[in-house]
Amino acid sequence: MVELKIEIPEDLAEELSQVPEEELQLIFSRLLKRELEKIRQVQSIVARSKMTKRHVKKLAEEVDLALLKDMKTIEKTSTC
C-alpha cells in the first residue's frame, strides 16, 4: 500500500481523530475511487466533445457567475 499525506482543517482533524485508522483507510479508499471514477467519466466526455477552448471558457464563466449568485443567496438567507 502507498502512503498519501493530506492537509485538512483542524475541525475535521478533530472529528477524524475519533475514527479508527482502519476505518479511515477504507473511507478514503472508497472516496478516492469514486472521485477518480468521476474524473474518468468527465475525461471520457471531454475527449468526445466538439467544444472549442472558447466555448469552454464561456461555459466556465457562466458557471462561475451562477455559483457566485448561489453563494450570495445563501449568504443572505443565513444572515437573516
Image (cartoon, helix red, strand yellow):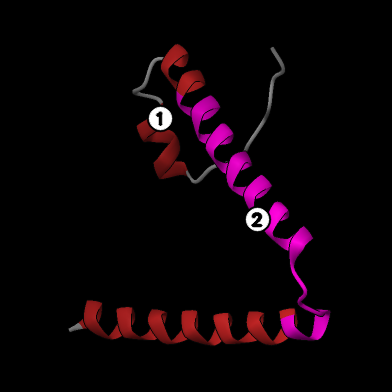
At 35% from the left and 33% from the top, the residue drawn is 15
Relative side of 26 to 44, left or right: left
What is the span of residues highlighted in magenta in the rendered image? 27-55
Q: Which mark is residue 51?
A: none
Residue found 68% across the figure and 59% down from its top: 45
| Location of residue 44 in the rendering, given as x and y in whole percent from the top left corner | 71, 52
Q: Which residue is mark 1?
A: 16
Task: Compare marks 1 and 2 and give the one earlier in the sequence.
Answer: 1
What kind of element bears circle 2? helix
Out of 64 and 17, give the one closest to the viewer. 64
**Residue at x 50% of width, y 34% of height:** 31
Which quadrant holds residue 48? Answer: bottom right
Which mark is on residue 42? Answer: 2
Q: Is residue 53 magenta?
A: yes
- Crowd band around label 2 with a 10 angstrom C-alpha radius: few (<14), some (14–19), many (20+): few
Q: Marks 1/2: CA distance?
A: 30 Å
